[in-house]
Structure formats: structure tokens, C-alpha cells
Amino acid sequence: MGRARLEAVAWILALGAGAAVLAWRGYRAQDADSRLYAEIAVGMSREPVGRWIAPEWPPGWYRHGHFREHPVGIHVLPALLARLGYPAAQAAYAVNGLYQVLTLVLLVRLASTMVEGTEARSLAWLVQLLPIAFIYRIRANHEPAVVLSLLVALLGTEGARTRRRDVALIVVGLVGLLLVKGVLAVLGPAVCALWLLARHVTARAPAPSLRPAWIGLALALVAMGLAVVLYELAYRRVTGESFFVPYLGQQLGLAAQPRSAALLADKAYNLVWYLGRVLWFPSPWSLILLGAARSGPTLDARGRDARAGIVFVAGLTVLYVGLFSLSDRRADRYIFPVYYAVGAAGILAAQRLWPRLGALAARVDQKVPLVPVGLWVLLFVLHLLGGPLGLPIVKVWGPEA
């Protein structure tokens, strides 16, 4: 059995075992968002599929009626899994595990377009040790699906430079992001554009033309617009009401609502607040990346392509932190993709700054090829047990807004 097939089988077995344990223990997350989304999936699974586009608020929550906080995308797979016979209350957590595993697999594939295979494969186990990964180990939030959608779109953007068929991945990733996260999906095309710009400014001559990828991104934007229209029509058909009018009014209204009269001071505080998260949640790799950014020749000594990753991560951080600093609604989760991007870039940079670390990662990759699967299972079990190693990362910044 080849390595790729062995890893695929191991991941499938790990996910299956994890889902079985979640059902056996009757797992429920502690955070409110996860509980809410899990309960919505339970309610959807009891309704005809034709009404899934318009789920209701579960009983006992602070609102009632149609749930219009986000589009329905995040709830569809858990509801479908429950309809297939899996315990409905745990379905959202089991699907979250699938998002995590696919993220690890696709992150390695994306990184391998810029760095050597052993360096890229180290991400599959080292990013599991990021502080943010411990917090989101078993939850039902949007964020893992958001990162996965962005990775699919970025893989399509990279591949579309030379393969037209990869345009489909851009469309799937960005439309999926829209159905999961709604208005914030506008960041998806910007992220893909950043990837292409980073590729352009760091490209060696001659480089593949970026025109096919730009065309693919334009087609994905058209697909997103069409998805909005079809979603609205389907929602109106089921409920007789609009989804996007009240949804956009609520989301944009809350984002623009000031918390105090000290406008500039608040924005400056938001910026510092988010930058603190960027340093903490991907640590220690975020600190290493800061040092590596000042060592361009070191990073460039083994291939200029690696520099594209640094440029991309810098642009991504500026985009997310800059945008959300303008809003007075603060939450760690708003810039969630930045944590994984900074962490992954820092891990790769560290292996180039310190050859011994790179050699260690290569030995692990050679001697223990299934270490990502084994580590995922270990951390999953420790989280369920709730021991001192299950949740070692405490949010020292205060409660999430």
C-alpha cells in the first residue's frame, strides 16, 4: 500500500473512531455557539429537506423564529449525517472533525507548491499544536469550515495558473464560504487575489501566466452572485420572506455600532487587541516568523518560491486585522484564518532558519509517516478526557466578544 493510500485509510479510521466515541459519550461542547449550532442541526434533521434552508431558533434561546444569523451552509452536513442515523446531538461535532482533517491535508498540499515535501508535510502535525487548535479541537463553530473553504479556493487559484479544470475549485471554495459565512465571504476573493499577487511579485522568470487564474477568480465571483440570487429565491419560496435584507441589516448594523465616543482611540485599541491575538494563538511560530521576515536572504537561499508565502501571509494579516479593527465588534474568531496562515508560515520559516529542526521534521516524516493521524487521535482523546494535557491553552485575554 502506498503512503498516500495508507494515510487516507488511517484518517478515515481515525474519523470513524472519533465519531463513534463522540456518540458513545454523548459529547456536548461548553461554548454557546457550538451548542446553538448543534441544536439547529438537530432541529433541521427532523424537518423535510425542502425546509432546511430556513431553520428555526431552538427552544430556550434568546431569539425565536427563523434563524438568520448566517446562511444555512454550516448545518447541512450535520443534519444529513443525523438523517443517516448518527446521533443528531453529536453530528455537528463529528463533521467538525472532518473539516479539521481535510484542512490538514489541503494545507500540506498548498504548502507543497512552494516548499519541499518534507517541510510541507510537517504542517500536518505541527499546526495541531497551535494554541488556537486546542481551543477549537471539538466544537461546532463556523471557523474550521471557513479555513477549509479558503484552502479549497486557494488550491484552485494556484492550480488554475496551469490547469483550467482547477477553476472549479475556486468556485466550490468561494461559494462554500458564502453559504457558511455569508457577508464575510467577500474576503474570499480578496484572499485569492492576494495569493496571485504574492506569486507575481516573487516569481522567477519565466513564470506561468496568471491570466487563467484571474479569469477563474472572476468566474467564481459571478458564481457567488448567482448563489446569492438562488439562495434568496429559495428562501422566499419556503418562508415568503427575504433572507438577505434582514440579515445584512443586522450584520452591518452591529458592525457599525460604536461602543464609545472615542473613535480613534477605540480603533487603535482594536488594532492592538487583534495583533496580540496574531502573536498568541499561532505562537511560538508567530514570533519566529517575525524574525524570519527580517532574514530575506536566509529564506531565499533554498528557493524564491518560499518568499511568496511570506508575502501572502503578511497581506492576509493586514487584510483581516485592518478590516476588523475598523469594527467595534471584537472576537478572536473573526480573524481565525490568520492564525493558521501565520502558524504555518512560521513553521516553514523555522525549518529554514534552523536546519536541525528541518532535519528533525524530515526524520519524523520518514520514520513515523502516520504521526499526523496519531497526534490527532491523541489530542482528541485528551480533550475528551479533560485532563491537564487535554486543554492546556487557557485564553488569558478575557472572554471572547
Image (cartoon, rainbow, N blue to C red):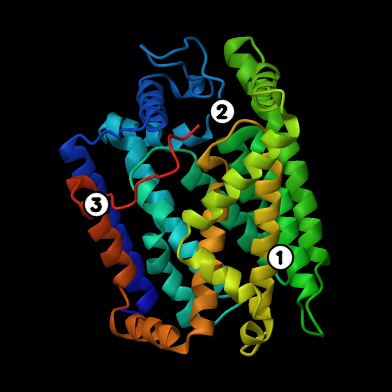
Q: Residues within 10 Å of mark 3 (few under 14, many from 20)?
A: some
Question: Which badge, 3 or 1, comes first in the chain's sequence?
Answer: 1
Amino acid type of disc 1? Ala
User: Is residue 344 at least partly visible in the picture?
Assistant: no
Q: Considering depth in this image, is 327 or 11 the residue closer to the camera?
A: 327
Q: Disc 3 versus disc 1: distance between alpha carbons?
A: 41 Å
Q: CA distance from mark 3 to mark 2?
A: 31 Å
Helix, strand or loop at disc 2?
loop
Q: Residue 183: horizontal and vertical position, in percent?
A: 67, 33
| Residue 132 to residue 230: above or below | below
Q: Residues within 10 Å of mark 2 (few under 14, many from 20)?
A: some
Mark 3, secondary structure of its residue: loop
- Tell me whether the residue at label 3 lies in contact with that at label 2, contact meaning CB atoms closer than 8 angstroms: no
What's the amino acid at mark 2? His
Which numbered tag is attached to residue 160?
1
- Whether residue 267 appears in this view of the structure is yes
Image disc number at residue 70: 2
Q: Specify whether 163 is left or right of 177.
A: right
Q: Earlier in the sequence, mark 3 or mark 2?
A: 2
| Front one among 199 and 329 | 329
Q: Amino acid at mark 3?
A: Gly
Q: Mark number for residue 181?
A: none
In the picture, the quarter occupied by the N terminus is bottom left
Q: Quadrant of residue 263?
A: top right
The residue at the point 39 percent across, 31 percent down is 79
- Which comes before the other along the chain, label 2 or label 1? 2
Q: Please determine whether, in this image, residue 143 is positioned above or below residue 71.
A: below
Residue 390: image tag: 3
Foreground of the two, 296 or 115? 296
Left or right: 82, with 244 as reference point:
left
Give the CA distance from mark 2 to mark 1.
30 Å
